[in-house]
Every structure is written in structure tokens, then in C-alpha cells.
Image (spheres, rainbow, N blue to C red):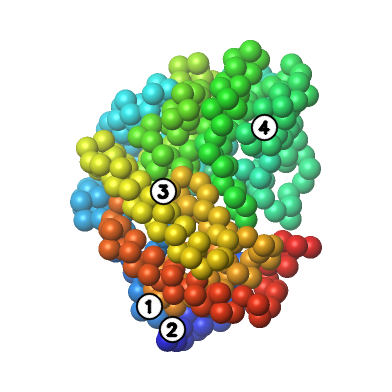
Amino acid sequence: MTRANSQDRDLRERAAAVIPGGMYGHQSTRLLPDDYPQFFSRAKGARLWDADGNEMLDFMCAYGPNLMGYADDAIDAAYIDRMRQGDTMTGPTGLIVELAERFTAMVTHADWAIFCKNGGDATQMALMIARAHTGRKTVILAKGAYHGAAPWCATRPVGVIREDKAHQLFCDYNDIASLEAAVAAAGDDLAAIFAAPMKHDAFTDQALPDPAYARRARELCDAAGALLLVDDVRAGLRIARDCSWSVVGVQPDLSSWGKCFANGHPISALLGSNTAKRAAAQIFTTGSFWYQAAPMAAALTTLDRVRNTDYLEHIEGLGTRLRDGLAERAAASGLGLRQTGPVTMPLFLFDDDPDLRKGFFWSSEMLRRGVYVHPWHNMFLCAAMTTADIDQALDAAEASLKALKGQVGSLGPVAKMSFLTA
Ligand SMILES: *Cc1c(COP(=O)(O)O)cnc(C)c1O
């Protein structure tokens, strides 16, 4: 079983000449197994085709944006319909008001919405609003939590100066003592606590929020007059039809949304409570494409689906089937496999696998069997998946575990991952 890859190889060669690094950011396959495709040609429902026409059941869902299924007919029809009537214009359409009404009706803490393009736009606005609201500088973040690629939150130091990250303090996720210590260190300068809805950092086991940690973050913000942000750009709508910390009973002042709420069409949002409304109206924030009407039409159709269907219970059921079935097969194989995070956003890591040689081998075996999994980033389920898809993934997993079991003693180090053990 060899996968065709001549188109992909050709595109990579050409990309190396005209695209820095051949590809950038999370869409680069630089840190994926060598046989993973870099280029894709088509997607429908839960499936994806690479540039060479190989079909895959896709557990990455575009790193989140695919919530209801790729190329969803009704959502895309709403988009195309609106696009044909005018998309980017001299001002917004009434859809922006309708979408703000819909979103604030859905999310308990929210009284207002600002729409933008990327999750990073929303988290950066949250930072500005917190500083405008408090007149203070310091923000507390959880170590390793992702909030975007702007200099203030970039995860790689190249091209970033210390001043870009000034006035930031760090705590450990779910560690109340470290959060309290950071608040104490902020003294009378605390503007905000930025919270990840769960620990969903790369290369490491995920963790659900400890309700006591979430409650303490709320109390500390209230005591200091600081704002609490929950960054729901990744987890939003896969944990709740509300802000993800609603499941632990905590309401933030601000929440950032993106990736999936227009099912892949380009729009993100910052939502806020009335506490932060004055500051939100005072900062200068905008973008050339922030008022695009077509993604708003797609968002309204997606949010209809969120409100009116059991999409969430459906992906929770499928996620549980996947988790239980995989646990059973991993146990039978004798290979230790850790499955962490909510079942709708799973991450798989093998025990005793510091440089991911087992994870890389197993993921490549899955790909050979037509299932795209990620060896070190959390994955995503989408509502277009079916029980049969999960069973296909479980069959592939069983065969791939068997292949790994046979090879586990002779696997060499994965050179590109050596930074993990350096
Ligand atoms: C992806 C992500 C962002 C940034 O969103 P972009 O659309 O890539 O700018 C921010 N926060 C979290 C938690 C994310 O997963």
C-alpha cells in the first residue's frame, strides 16, 4: 500500500522557492511524519483529499474550523448567496447586528460582540480592552497556553523582543497557588487574567479545567477589579453551546471565539459583558475585511445548527465511542496510550515516547489506512462524522497498533523531533 505523492512532492519543491520555509505556521508539515501530505485538493463532510487524490477521514478538521462538516451545503449556500449580493463593502450589512444579537443571546456572560477575522485579532483586542478598562498593564497567562501568533503571544522567540512581552506574568494551568502568586506579584497593576478554557497545549497531555481554579480566577479578578478572559477560539462550541467555562459555573468578562463558528468561513469574535463595554467602545480596532457579510451569513446558519440540532451530543457520542474503543484496543496491544482532553477534542500520546517515535510510526500507519490523525496536537471531531467513520478509525487503529507492536523495539529516533528531548 503506497500512497501516491508526486503532486505533493512537486508542489513542495516549487513552494520551497517562493514560500519562506516551504510553508509556515501550523499548516507546515515540518513537524509531522515525512509521509504526511502538505497540500490538499478537496474536502467534503468528514473527509479530505490530498493533492494526489488520496482520501482521508480527517480528525484535524482544519485545526478546528470544520465543525459541521466540510463544504456543508446549507452553510455554503448562505455564504455564496450573500457574497453575490455584496460582501466587503463601504460598510457592514444588517447581518452584523443580527449576528451580535444571536451570539449574545447564546453566550451567558455576553452583552456585546465585536467581529474580526482571526482568533489573534480577538485576543489582542481583549488585551487592549483590559488595559483600557483598568488603566493597568499586567496580564497573567498560563504557561504554554496558545493565544495567537502576534509578538505579544508568539510561541517562538525569533523576531520577538523582550519588550513585546513586557508586563506578563505566568501561572501553571489548574494550579491555584501559582495563580495566586502571580496575582500577588502583579500588585496593584493587574489588568487581566487570560484563561484557556482547558489545557490544550501541544506535545503534552490535555487537562480539563479544575472548577476550583476557574472560580479562584474569577474571585481574584473581582477582588482586583481586573477582567477575566476565556480564550474559546479553539474549544468554543465543542464543549458547550455557551462559553466553555459555563460547564464549571464560571462567567468571564470577555471571551474570544473563532475557528469554527462559521464552519470554516473567515470570521472571529470578541464577546464581552457590560463591565467591559465602555472600554471596548473606546479602543481603536478595525480591519479591512472585518465587515465582510458572507462569513456573517455563514455564521448565522452555523449558529442556527448549533441551537437547533443535537450536533454536540452527536460528536460527544462519537468521541466516547472512539475513546472507549481505542482504550480497549490499546490495552489489548499492551502499548500504553494516553487519551486526554474532552472526547470531542482528543489528544493521543504513547507512554515512554519522549521523542514521539511511537506516535509518528502509529500516525503514519493510520494515514496509510486512510485516517488522518495528529501525533502531538489535539484533534477535533465534526458533526458530519458517523458511527461507521469511528469504526473505520478503530479498525485502522487496531491494525496500526499491531504494526507498531511488531516494530516498537527497532524504531529509530525521529530527527525532526529531537528538540523535544534536547
Ligand atoms: C487558534 C487559536 C488562537 C488564534 O486564532 P487565529 O485564528 O489562528 O489567529 C487563539 N487562541 C487559541 C486558543 C487558539 O487555538
Name the mark nearer the viewer: 2 or 4: 4
Q: Earlier in the sequence, mark 4 or mark 1?
A: 1
* Label 3 close to label 1 by CB (< 8 Å): no
Q: Nearer the viewer, mark 4 or mark 1?
A: 4
Q: Amino acid at mark 4?
A: Asp
Mark 3 vs mark 4, CA separation in Å? 24 Å
The dot on residue 54 is: 1
Q: Residue at x 54, y 34 (%)?
A: 209
In front: label 3 or label 2: 3
Which one is earlier in the sequence, the residue at label 2 or at label 4? 2
**Amino acid type indicated by mark 3:** Thr
Q: Could you tell which of marks 3 and 1 lies nearer the N-terminus?
A: 1
Which residue is tagged 2?
3
**Residue located 77% across and 46% down the image:** 161
Is the residue under label 1 in contact with that under label 4 (CB below 8 Å)?
A: no
Can you tell which quarter of the image residue 309 is in?
top left
Badge 1 marks a residue whose secondary structure is loop
Q: Earlier in the sequence, mark 3 or mark 4?
A: 4
Residue 4 coordinates in the image, percent (x, y): 43, 85
Q: Quadrant of residue 71?
A: bottom left
Report the residue marked by disc 4. 175
| Callout 3 secondary element | loop
Instruction: Find residue 45 and report its horizontal and vertical position in percent.
Output: 29, 60
Q: CA distance from mark 2 to mark 1?
A: 7 Å
Quadrant showing the N terminus: bottom left
Could you tell which of marks 3 and 2 lies nearer the N-terminus? 2
